[in-house]
Amino acid sequence: MIDIGVNLTSSRFDKDRDDVVAQAQQAGVSGMILTGTNVEESQAAADLAACYPGYAYATAGVHPHDAKLVDPADLSAIRHLAQRPEVVAIGECGLDYNRDFSPRPQQEAVFEAQLALAAEHALPVFMHCRDAHDRWLAILRPWLNKLPAAVLHCFTGDDHALRGCLDAGLYIASRVGSATNGADNSFSNR
Ligand SMILES: [Zn+2]
């Protein structure tokens, strides 16, 4: 059992991070993937994962909320991170038309750039999609046969959208998660 969406870099864990990891291990969690949401966080997630070798891994990517801040140097930083042994997926990336914290054209461009990066490095993608299903799937679909796996960790669609995702071979995660799987509940609207 692997927890693939852990926000272990959060300052909320500054006091008991090692205990949280130890408790997860005792509870039978055999590995965890720490979520990177921008360049700085992805760097921090990879560095933290390196503290738990063979147990913790990381994603490297830019959340749609942060798409407006991305420049070419950020994408090359993500590319660089993708080559680290701790980094096992590109993300969190995708579209969020619910909050719209970044302009939609920028969200789409940054999402597609990360799909290209994932394909280039043969890495899975860890995705976020909120209220953007049709556009998100249209951008994703041409890349799917170039990606080893694709997970949608934030799903807000209806039955029809769910069927579309499953037919496309995606893995789906619920928004309702455990204390450590807080990417879309208690941790900063992500
Ligand atoms: Zn998310």
Image: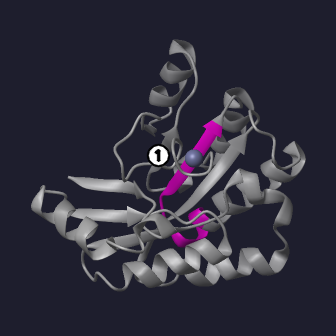
**Crowding at mark 1 (Cα within 10 Å: few <14, some 14-19, many 20+):** many
Can you name the residue that lies furthest to the front here? Answer: 15
- In the image, residue 181 above or below residue 122: above
Q: Give the residue at x 85% y 59%.
A: 68
Q: Position of residue 61 (x, y in %)?
A: 62, 65
Viewed as shown, does residue 113 lie left or right of 7?
right
Range drawn in magenta: 118-129
Viewed as shown, does residue 63 lie left or right of 110?
left
Viewed as shown, does residue 1 lie left or right of 148?
left
Q: Position of residue 163 (x, y in %)?
A: 49, 20
Q: Position of residue 133 (x, y in %)?
A: 67, 29
Determine which residue is flagged by label 1. 151
Q: Position of residue 67 (x, y in %)?
A: 79, 58
Q: Give the residue at x 72% y 40%.
A: 96
Number of marks present in the image shown: 1
**Residue 126 is one of the magenta-drawn residues:** yes
Return the residue nearer the eye: 131 or 116.
131
Q: Is mark 1 within 8 Å of ligand 1?
A: no
Return the residue nearer the eye: 180 or 28.
180
- In the image, residue 172 above or below residue 102: above
Residue type at the position of mark 1: Val
Can you name the residue that lies furthest to the top here? Answer: 159
**Residue 119 is one of the magenta-drawn residues:** yes
Q: Give the residue at x 10% y 62%.
A: 26
Q: Give the residue at x 42% y 34%.
A: 176
The colour scheme applied to this rendered structure is: one colour
